[in-house]
Image (cartoon, helix red, strand yellow):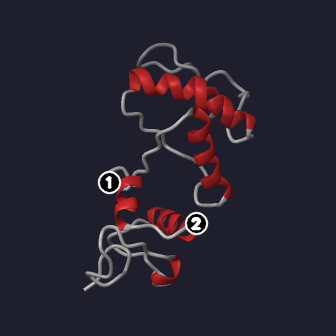
Amino acid sequence: MKVALGLPVGFSGPDDPISITDLPVDILGSAFSAGLSVSTRALIAEAPRTPRDLIQRGAGGSGHRLLVGSAREVADDLRSWFEAGTADGFTIMPADTAVDLPNFATLVVPILQEYGLFQKEYPHPTLRGRLGLPARQGFFEVAA
């Protein structure tokens, strides 16, 4: 019997480190998405991780990474994933959109722009314009 990392049940306890050499070559399977497999492997390749570390970094095991820290720490973490080739973009899921989303936009985005990882200017002021779609006249009407 195997678990999500492809290791035998009971391979390690919650605080026993797992190194990259412990993992089978392919840890893909029904329990893992390809992205989660690559990102988990990348984390373990950086340094041995305990199952507890992996769960905490995965936001309680939901498959989402939890980032907490200063704006620079969050931007540096996102940058490291991008530069390692384990991500080509991110979906931000703030815990409290009223606080965390404005903080991300005003504190983290400028650092990502400084790193060249986030656009500063756009060719058109609206998403519809950037996609080459006609401007809306009203809620249900589209300009001819």
Q: State the residue at coordinates (40%, 60%).
A: 53
Q: Residues within 10 Å of mark 2 (few under 14, many from 20)?
A: few
The quadrant of the picture occupied by the N terminus is bottom left
Residue at the (37%, 33%) spot, across then down:
95
Name the quadrant containing residue 5.
bottom left
Q: Amino acid at mark 2?
A: Glu
* 1 or 2: tag closer to the N-terminus: 2
Query: Considering depth in this image, is 48 or 138 the residue closer to the camera?
Result: 48
39 vs 129, left or right, is left
Left or right of 115, for residue 86: left
Q: Residue at x 46, y 84 (%)?
A: 24
Q: Is residue 65 above or below residue 46?
A: above
Picture layout, residue 59 above or below residue 52: above
Give the label, 1 or 2, closer to the camera. Answer: 2
**Helix, strand or loop for disc 2:** helix
Residue in front for this viewpoint, 139 or 64 = 64
From the top left corner, tell me how far across and down residue 96 is, in percent.
Answer: 37, 28
Write down the residue under mark 1.
Answer: 62
Instruction: Please tell me whether residue 117 is drawn above or below residue 81 in the rendered image.
Output: above
The residue located at (66%, 21%) in the rendering is 125
Q: In the image, residue 139 lies at what x, y percent?
A: 42, 16
Q: Amino acid at mark 1?
A: Ser
Q: Secondary structure at mark 1?
A: loop
Camera-side residue: 86 or 42? Answer: 42
Q: CA distance from mark 1 to mark 2?
A: 21 Å
Residue position marked by numbered label 2 in the rendering: 46
